[in-house]
Amino acid sequence: MPSGEPSVRYRIGVDENGLGPRLGPMVVTAVLSRVTEAGWQTAGRAPRGALAQRLGDSKQLVAHGDVSLGEAWARALVARGCGRAGPVSSVGELLHAVSLEDGAALRAPCPSHVEEQCWSEDGEAFAAPDKLLRAIGRDLDKLAEKGVEIVAVRSILICAKRMNDGARAGKNRFVLDLHAMERLILELRALAGVDVFAVCGKVGGFGKYGAAFGPLAGRLHLVVEESRARSAYRFPGLGEIAFVRDSDASDLCVAMASMVGKYVREAMMGRVARHYQRAVPGLHGASGYHDPITSAFIKATRLIRSAREIPDDCFERRAAEGEASLESGGP
């Protein structure tokens, strides 16, 4: 390293969106940052000041029907070269730019007559105003000045079909969430080219992760800490991974990942809603969560889904065995 150049480390924030809904995908997102020693404290704490009005817990800042803030973060990051491709001019291009998988892989589980349900771009448009995009651009500039440069953002979309296939294979939603986090960390570790420090949202509320690892299974690792609040593991040649409770409210990169992931999930759920609204007059859109509007949406679309031979597995999630045990303590 040239004399006078500040030392840097790479930090990853990972979070999921849509773990528990009835409809729509679960989205797991990771943000990779290049952080100087001076910026390490900034990256590892909750956003402060004016930034906290635009970056924080996505459940509080991005609501169903109002996704402009999450969209703005995704667009601003992709515009700076943090996505797989860019620039983008449509919602569809934006979703593919942040996705870890390409279009063919994303559509691979879809029967051909079902693709339109999730992949039609009809009725889509960007919602974030230019003023908001400029504000987030300034936020990213200020973070870079403080020693936190965002390098990459990637999301994994796990659709209802993939979640149901996982359930039949004995992989419940918590395991699928964990394995997606592992895939993202491995991908971004390769992109960084050096060991990383990754902070993830807690998965399933349990303390011990070793037996549940998927992509990381079989890798030598050291248990640093295992508790309800924080579980951490050190992997030679990879770095350290910490699963931290409420990390979206206490870690800047996790918060940013959560904002992008929330937008991706809402955009995909919006496609499902519009698909059936085109066929059922007066049908209200739905969040996909466990609420009366979603229940009414499922009931109102039953006949059209049957007529179009839409498999239930491509529409609504099923529960898998073992979820309660993960929530109660361990794999």
Image (spheres, helix red, strand yellow):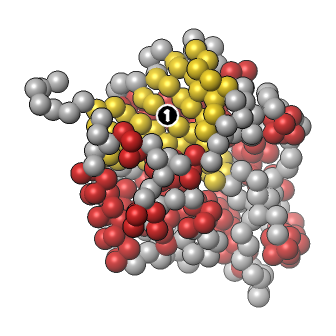
Residue found at the very far top of the displayed protein: 220
Position of 309 compared to 151: left or right? Answer: right
Residue found at the very far left of the displayed protein: 3
Q: Residue at x 77, y 64 (%)?
A: 289
Residue found at the very far bottom of the displayed protein: 282
Element under label 1? strand
**Where is 232 relative to 142, above or below?**
above
Residue 174 image offset from top left, x and y in percent = 74, 39
Q: Is residue 108 visible?
A: no
What type is the residue that disc 1 sits on?
Ala
Q: In which quadrant of the rendered image does the N terminus lie?
A: top left
**Where is 56 relative to 200, above or below?**
below
Q: Is residue 54 visible?
A: yes
Q: Residue at x 64, y 29 (%)?
A: 231
- Crowding around mark 1 (Cα neighbors within 10 Å: few <14, some 14 to 19, many 20+) is many
Residue 26 image offset from top left, x and y in percent = 67, 51
Residue 184 image offset from top left, x and y in percent = 52, 37
User: Between residues 329 and 109, which one lies in front from this camera angle?
Assistant: 329
Number of marks: 1
Q: Residue at x 56, y 32 (%)?
A: 242
User: Between residues 312 and 72, which one lies in front from this camera angle?
Assistant: 72
User: Between residues 31 and 4, which one lies in front from this camera angle?
Assistant: 4
Position of 164 compared to 88: left or right? Answer: right
User: Between residues 189 and 163, which one lies in front from this camera angle?
Assistant: 189
Residue 71 image offset from top left, x and y in percent = 47, 66
Q: In which quadrant of the rendered image does the C terminus lie?
A: top right
**Where is 129 relative to 315, above or below?**
below
**Where is 141 relative to 322, above or below?**
below
Q: Which residue is mark 1?
A: 198
